[in-house]
């Protein structure tokens, strides 16, 4: 990756906040470098030691330091652990690699310390390697370099390795979210383009939006994830079109939609406490968001969590059985469907299926079947050509009076009153 890539990956503000604090706490010098050894940022202590500044005061010393950083960075990446080395000037430094998805980006350089006081041999080597610099000045400046025991240096390196890995995981998560936001933008654009190609009439009123919203909420109550997600996509495109991209209005509608969805999820069998906690976190998160695609991504995410919460099944076999039972009911609700017929279709006993519905959906088989039929009745009664009697028969009720009784129990009014309110 290029210098630009690593700079985009590392969040400068967060890098300074975390590694700057590490530098101040330990008194150690820290730099972020790319894989060429080039310094991107000096963190915490804003300046290199007087000794290092003097070593780098000419192009020859600068080049040697760059080569030291590059070689150390490559070695650290090779072993994927802190790499200790003595630079050409004789001080101890270590490099902690930055590796993302097996791609080597650079490293965090730390240290610039001595493990022991400069002796005669050290000074002779220092003079020999840096013959172009004033030796007396070198002696004075090297005496100001911090001392650190091998144990202290190793502990600092281990701690820095943990911190750098935390930064990598955090920034990787941020990049993944950015990628998701980008896909969301592309999805919105594609939806709008498809509407233009199909000459679909532009969404113009909230009446239509609210009808689609009610349909969407019914899918959540039924745990119909596929239809819920498909309808949500259309709802969000409608919302974008209607509001002409006004962020304030979109934010209000998104908060409403999340709140309504949470209630529908609880009605569908999700745990109320967990749903409310998720909703609270969502509301707090939304308040700090500015981009439309983030609004849409976040609401997609929480609604997916709500839907997943309807089926908290530890056993995958049970999950498959319940989902297959739901699918069978959705396809055959208009028939005189029974628990036994559904169990036979799944090749399990009626008692076992009944137990699964109670344990996993917190309702009986008949409760769920009735819920599906009522939701379908609501959809059908929006069509003027269907009478209440026709709707009753279409959804599997033999008795219109019993249908009216059940409908009132779930919706709060009789089918006739509900239908008359629509037209």
Image: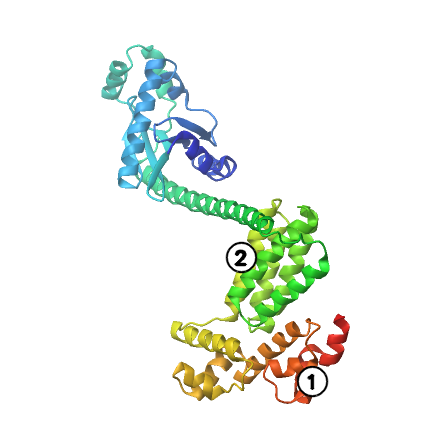
Q: Which mark is residue 361?
A: none
Q: Is residue 91 visible?
A: no
Q: Which residue is mark 1?
A: 404
Viewed as shown, does residue 421 lie left or right of 410?
right
Residue 219 visible in rendering: yes
Q: Is residue 17 above or below residue 236?
A: above
Give whichever of discs 2 and 1 has the lower sequence position: 2
Name the spot of residue 115 as percent of width and height, x first. 30, 31
Quarter the C terminus occupies: bottom right
- Picture quadrant of residue 112: top left
Counting from the top left corner in percent of width and height, residue 328 is at 48, 77
- The residue labelled by disc 2 is 301
Which quadrant holds the N terminus? top left
Which residue is rendered at x = 42% and y = 72% of the image?
314
Query: Which residue is at a point 49% across and 35% down the rendered structure image?
Result: 12
Contact between marks 2 and 1 (CB within 8 A): the answer is no
Residue 107 percent coordinates (x, y) = 36, 35
Per the model, the C-alpha gap separating discs 2 and 1 is 37 Å
Q: Quadrant of residue 136?
A: top left
Q: Does residue 340 lie above or below 199 as drawn?
A: below
Report the front residue among 388 and 59: 388
SS under mark 1: helix
Question: Crowdedness of circle 2 by 10 Å Cα count: few (<14), some, many (20+)?
Answer: few
């Amino acid at each position: 990756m290029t210098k630009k890539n690593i700079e985009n990956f590392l969040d400068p503000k967060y890098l300074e906040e975390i590694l700057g604090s590490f530098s101040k706490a330990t008194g150690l010098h820290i730099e972020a470098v790319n894989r060429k050894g080039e310094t991107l940022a000096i963190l915490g202590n804003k300046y290199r030691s007087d000794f290092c500044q003097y070593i780098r005061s000419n192009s020859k010393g600068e080049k040697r330091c760059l080569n030291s950083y590059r070689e150390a960075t490559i070695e650290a990446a090779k072993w994927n652990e802190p790499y200790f080395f003595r630079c050409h000037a004789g001080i101890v430094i270590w490099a902690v690699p930055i590796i993302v998805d097996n791609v080597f980006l650079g490293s965090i350089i730390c240290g610039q310390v001595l493990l022991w006081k400069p002796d005669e041999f050290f000074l002779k080597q220092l003079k020999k390697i840096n013959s172009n610099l004033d030796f007396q000045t070198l002696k004075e400046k090297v005496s100001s370099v911090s001392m650190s025991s091998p144990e202290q240096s190793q502990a600092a390196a281990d701690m820095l390795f943990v911190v750098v890995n935390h930064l990598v995981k955090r920034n990787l998560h941020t990049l993944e979210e950015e990628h998701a936001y980008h896909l969301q933008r592309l999805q919105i654009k594609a939806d709008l383009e498809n509407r233009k190609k199909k000459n679909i009439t532009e969404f113009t009123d909230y009446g239509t939006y609210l009808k689609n919203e009610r349909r969407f909420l019914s899918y959540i109550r039924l745990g119909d994830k596929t239809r819920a997600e498909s309808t949500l996509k259309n709802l969000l495109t409608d919302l974008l079109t209607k509001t002409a991209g006004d962020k304030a209005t979109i934010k209000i509608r998104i908060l409403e939609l999340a709140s309504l969805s949470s209630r529908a999820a609880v009605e569908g069998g999700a745990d109320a406490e967990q749903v409310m906690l998720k909703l609270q976190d969502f509301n707090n998160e939304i308040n700090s968001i500015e981009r439309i695609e983030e609004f849409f991504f976040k609401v997609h995410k929480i609604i997916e969590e709500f839907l997943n919460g309807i089926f908290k099944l530890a056993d995958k076999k049970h999950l498959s059985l319940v989902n297959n039972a739901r699918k069978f009911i959705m396809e055959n609700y208009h028939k005189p469907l029974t628990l036994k017929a559904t169990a036979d279709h799944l090749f399990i006993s009626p008692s076992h299926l009944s137990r699964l519905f109670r344990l996993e959906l917190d309702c009986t088989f008949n409760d769920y079947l009735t819920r599906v039929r009522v939701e379908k009745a609501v959809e059908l009664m929006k069509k003027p050509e269907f009478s209440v009697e026709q709707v009753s028969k279409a959804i599997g009720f033999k008795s219109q009076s019993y249908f009216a009784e059940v409908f009132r129990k779930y919706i709060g009014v009789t089918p006739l009153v509900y239908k008359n309110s629509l037209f």
